[in-house]
Amino acid sequence: MVVAIGFEGSANKLGVGIVKDGVVLSNPRHTYITPPGQGFLPKNTAQHHREHALEVLQKALDEAKISPKDIDVVCYTKGPGMGAPLVSTAIVARTVAQLWGKPMIAVNHCIGHIEMGRLVTGAENPIVLYVSGGNTQVIAYSQRRYRIFGETIDIAVGNCLDRFARVLKLSNDPSPGYNIEQLAKKGNKFLELPYVVKGMDVSFSGLLSFIEEKAPQLLQKGEYTPEDLCFSLQETVFAMLIEITERAMAHCGSQEVLIVGGVGCNKRLQEMMETMAKERGAKLYATDERFCIDNGAMIAQAGWEMFRSGQTTPLKDTTCTQRFRTDEVDITWRS
Amino acid sequence: MTEKKLKVDLSVPFPTEREAQIACGTLSVDSEPKRGGVKKELVVKGNVLNIHFEALEARMMRVGMNSFFDHLNLVIETMEKFGPPEK
């Protein structure tokens, strides 16, 4: 029996989760929400994490009804992500690991998403579409690595959505992407937007510039409503993602597809993926916002796998890094 | 040779030597940003954590020390809430 606690703080979510042999005992989270029209900056986000880390940790222990002595390993997000928030979160993890006399594990954030998705859905060996505010990747497992088949060559799809939400001054509560999704349901007039797929890769920055520039005049003239623009944006960027995911599935002959990451809880994206999967006779696996959006349990789960395969990270090596690719990690727990 | 560096020595007492060592362990891991021009060294003597800072400019020193104090506070709060250390 192994109990792992995970600390996540690579972006604007601060999460602490406890996992015991594949069962999530607790997974509280506190999100830093900025005013409409504003993004989250590293310095303020780090401050948010420092202010809330201890209460979220206490909540995780209380909800799991376990005492620190029952914990076997302390896991934290090493990267990728924003430097200052990562370090602030890692400092709490390092301190409690020493106070409680527990070993540590440094976890790659993307691997955390994948392993949590596999745990929650039971997908065996899926093609993974990892879509969030900071990452956009199509991933397949082969020979002890999660290999990146395609990815964004500039900004992440979630970043594109978040930044368009700022143009419309949408609320960031619970998240800008969620509010775009709600508006998009009421849109029906489609605005053609640049559709940029380059081989297995996608690009969103040109599309974002285009819609950022056009939106104010289109709205002012009354040609399009904010709902129409949200609808057009979602349909376009999701179609691009489905295209590269389908190509990866065809290449690997995979019959499973798993969506992870914050954008993964978008119902429209899931619906489009479901249609594509059905046509191929494949099965879609997706999770809800508890596990899609950054959380502590996913770090605990990936750390749990790493710990059981014999890894630990010495204290002096528990650094953080803003750049840490998914395919840098040796997957010692899968055959 | 004339000295050009700014230097600050800071001493932080902890309830016990073990806690000073834990704080040192946590705070020694992250290296200062390369272009920040700040150097720091942490040493534990008894129950006191001694930190020596060096920087080329006052501005850099301020930035380095500000973030150090943010982190030090977090370590102390964590110890108060989740300590004392297990034997």
Image (spheres, coloured by chain):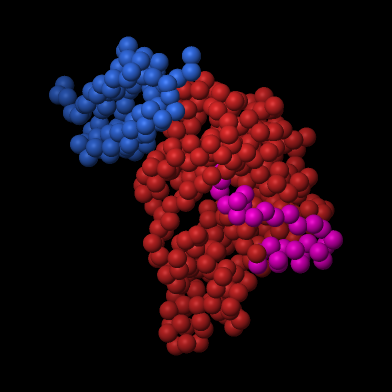
> Does residue A283 show up magenta in the picture?
yes
Q: Residue furthest top?
A: B46
- The residue at the point 26 percent across, 27 percent down is B54
The residue shown at (48%, 48%) is: A30
Relative to residue A23, is residue A75 drawn left or right? left
Residue A321: x and y in percent read 49, 38
Furthest toward the right, the residue is A281
Indicate whether A308 appears above or below A132: above
Q: How far across and how far down the image is residue A120, in percent?
A: 70, 46
Q: Is residue A308 above or below residue A299?
A: above
Whether residue A214 is visible, yes or no, is yes
* Residue name at image x 65 percent, y 67 percent: A268
Quadrant showing the C terminus of chain A: top right
- The tally of labels here is 0
Q: Which chain is red?
A: A
Helix, strand or loop for the magenta stretch, by majority = helix
* Magenta-drawn segment: A268-296
Q: Position of residue A71 (x, y in %)?
A: 59, 27
Above or below residue A19? Residue A237 is below
Q: Residue furthest left?
A: B2
Location of residue B41 in the rendering, given as x and y in whole percent from the top left corner: 33, 22
Q: Nearer the viewer, residue B77 or A132?
A: B77
**In-front residue for pair A314/A75:** A75
> Does A207 lie within the magenta span?
no
Q: Who is closer to the viewer here, B60 or B80?
A: B80
Residue at point 69%, 27% (across, down): A1
- In this rendering, the answer to whether B16 lies above or below A147 is above
Q: Is residue A258 left or right of residue A253?
A: left
Tell me if B27 is positioned left or right of A283 in this view: left
What is the letter of the blue chain?
B
Q: Which corner quadrant of the image does residue A21 belong to?
A: top right
Whether residue B50 is visible? no
